[in-house]
Amino acid sequence: MEAHGKPPRASRVSVSQLMLPEHANAWGKVHGGLIMKLVDECGGIAAMRHAQRPCVTVAIDSMTFQSAVEVGQVLCCDALITYVGRTAIEITVEVHAEDPIAGCVTHTNTAQVVYVAIDDAGRPTRVPDLLLETDEDRARWETGKQRQEARVAARKQAKRAGR
Ligand SMILES: CC(C)(COP(=O)(O)OP(=O)(O)OC[C@H]1O[C@@H](n2cnc3c(N)ncnc32)[C@H](O)[C@@H]1OP(=O)(O)O)[C@@H](O)C(=O)NCCC(=O)NCCS
């Protein structure tokens, strides 16, 4: 596919889901694994919107949950592309829990997820460039680029160590 530039706003994704008893763990709080799944799905949609190709998850940075999500709250995931390489796309997903009755919103966590666009044979394929339109786009790109360089270096080190 011929690559061409697209701004982050073109692939931005917001997903909201009401948390029900079936989403709770044994202690009545929303299961962390469910939140991770929603983060991955939300980021994956943004990646595929940008690449217009199937995208697979290659890395998820550590996730720290700052507060519990309760049944009855609405889990809101907002995904935005922060950096693209040749075939890899870094997405930042912001997670909030909204109490729709009280009208208050709590920041739950921020996650960085890296996807790789794949061709019909399952090999990494080139993605469109990211058009940086605003100072915020440019600032996010710089930090995303640094994170990706660190991941690539860690991957090389792990390979050298035979992991
Ligand atoms: C993703 C996958 C196709 C990449 O294949 P690969 O042989 O490692 O390909 P490459 O070495 O060319 O890497 C492709 C891109 O991924 C990036 N990448 C690979 N491993 C990475 C990691 N651990 N962290 C961040 N980026 C990584 C590379 O830097 C490269 O980016 P670039 O093209 O923008 O420079 C392959 O690792 C795979 O199929 N993994 C399993 C994916 C999966 O099943 N996910 C869960 C279900 S969706």
Image (cartoon, rainbow, N blue to C red):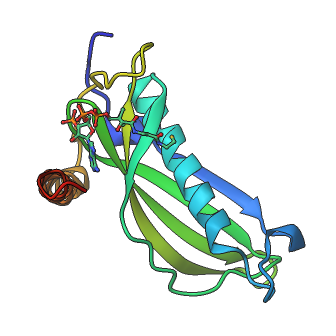
Q: Residue at x 12, y 57 (%)?
A: 157
Would residue 3 appear left or right of 108 to someone viewing this image? left
Residue depicted at 58% across the width and 51% down the height: 14
Find residue 140 and report its horizontal and vertical position in percent.
23, 57
Residue 122, relative to residue 38: is it above or below?
Answer: above
Task: Quadrant for residue 108, please give it.
Answer: bottom right
Rendered view: 30 above or below 155: below
- Left or right side of 98 for 1: left
Percent position of residue 42, x then y: 56, 49
Q: At 47% from the left edge and 52% from the top edge, which residue is drawn?
A: 79
Residue 89 drawn at (x, y percent): 32, 41
Question: Relative to 76, is 95 on the left or the right?
Answer: left
User: Foreground: 59 or 147?
Assistant: 59
104 or 62, nearer to the observer: 62
The image quarter in which residue 116 lies:
top left
- Residue 12 position in % (x across, y down): 47, 44
Outermost residue, right side: 21
**Residue 103: quadrant of the picture:** bottom right
| As drawn, 114 above or below 70 | above
Quarter of the picture containing the N terminus is top left
User: For the C terminus, which image quadrant?
Assistant: bottom left
What residue is at 35 percent from the left and 22 percent from the top? 123
The total of numbered circles placed on residues is: 0
Residue extending farthest to the top is 2
